[in-house]
Image (cartoon, rainbow, N blue to C red):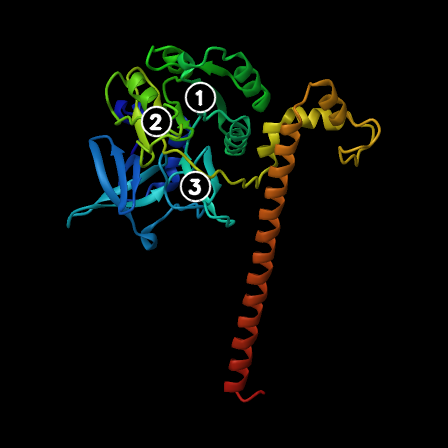
Amino acid sequence: MRTGLNPTLQRLGWRDLFEQSLPRFADVPGVLGRVRAQHRGGYEIACEHGDLPAIVEGKTMRGWDGASLPIVGDWVLVEQLSAGGAVIRALLPRFSKLARRAAGGGIEEQSLVANVDLALIVTSLEQDFSPRRIERYVMMAREGGVSPVLALSKVDLCPDPLPAIEQARAAAPGAPVLLLSTLQLQGVDAVRSLLHEGQTMVLLGSSGVGKSTLLNALLGRQEIAVGEVRSDGKGRHTTTHRHLVPLEGGGVLIDTPGMRELGVLAQDEQAFDAFEDLDALMEACRFSDCQHRNEPGCAIQGAIQSGELPLERLQAYQKMKAEADWVAAQRDARARADSKGKARRLSRELQATLRRKGRV
């Protein structure tokens, strides 16, 4: 029986959870590997004896969870073919997954990375800083079963970071907040200490906030090219695809390109754990159906008036809740339409069968 209990795979983040799932794939050909990168033409799979370029052939997949194609961070079984090349034959169960609504305003899910323990949300203390964007990243992490950590970068360029620290903590209650200056190596050791053997951390954030610079500092080498920030304060896309890299001493990092859109899915109520401070206040409202506008005894409005709760945070919650409700309504409408279409097709097929038999 194949096993992932070898030093190379353990360095890539193998753990007991995956080992326990192997018996169900006993008759699936191939060797264990982890998706290191995903390209338009296929995948790069890190295996015990090196990296393999591979593709997916849907008809040959077994043990498939049906949720999506493999993504960076997934553990797979990949078979080398005698004619050349390799094929992913099975996808092992995930313990976490980060996803967003696909760019362009639709309702489709775009899966990003899998089997991640920590999401390091990197935001610059220059023009990029936005508590509202932090909230969206935190929501995505919490819904995916991933613990968020905030990293405020370029602190050496910010004379007084305290207001930003307070805003970041308000946007992500309970999440650790780190200060970074990768040029001065400030905070790099603190990030490194978060990762332990077998754990995976994904770097999230806009272009130009310093994700690739941080990854290079953690690795102690120039793994990824680093570009300068444009004169308008917007970053350049130095990372063009998600990429998995093991760290010396244990732990795995996944670098990601900057995301211009971060649409809400919120298919699970746990996504709104990112707003647990508002939940606690809502429970303290006098009326259970309080709309948090002008009702007497509204704890939310009381907290806003006292300065405990920023008005912008309530507005962000309401906006994301409306997005999530819209996505749910659109999906329900699509499901109903699909169900009606299926019923009509079955009816037509039945009528055709009866006509052939002369019964109508």
| Mark with earlier residue (2, 1) | 1
Q: Local crowd at mark 2 within 10 Å, few (<14), some, or many (≥20)?
A: some
Where residue 183 appears, as percent x and y from the top left, is 32, 14
Which picture quadrant has residue 28? top left
- The residue labelled by disc 2 is 229
Q: Examine the rendered structure and indicate whether residue 69 appears above or below residue 202.
A: below
Q: Are marks 1 and 3 in contact (CB under 8 Å)?
A: no
Q: Which mark is residue 202?
A: none
Q: Which residue does the numbered mark 1 point to in the structure image?
A: 126
Mark linked to residue 111: 3
Three-letter code for the amino acid on which mark 3 is drawn: Ser
Amino acid on which the number 1 mark rests in the picture: Glu
Of the two numbered discs 2 and 3 on the same chain, state the one appearing first in sequence. Answer: 3
In-image side of 82 versus 239 (left or right):
left
Between the residue at mark 2 and the residue at mark 3, the CA separation in whole angstroms equals: 28 Å
Q: Earlier in the sequence, mark 1 or mark 3?
A: 3
Task: Tell whether label 1 touches label 2 (CB within 8 Å).
Answer: yes
Foreground pick, 260 / 194: 260
Q: Crowding at label 3, few (<14), some or many (≥20) Cα neighbours within 10 Å?
A: some
Marks 1 and 3: which is nearer the front? 1
68, 101: nearer the viewer: 101
Q: Nearer the viewer, residue 218 or 116?
A: 218
Residue 13 shows in this picture: no
Relative to residue 312, is residue 193 drawn left or right? left
Helix or strand or loop: what does disc 1 sit on? Answer: loop
The residue sitting at the right extreme is 296
Question: Counting other residues with Cα less than 10 Å from the Cα at mark 1, is it few (<14), some (14-19), or many (20 or more)?
Answer: some
Assign a secondary structure to mark 3: strand
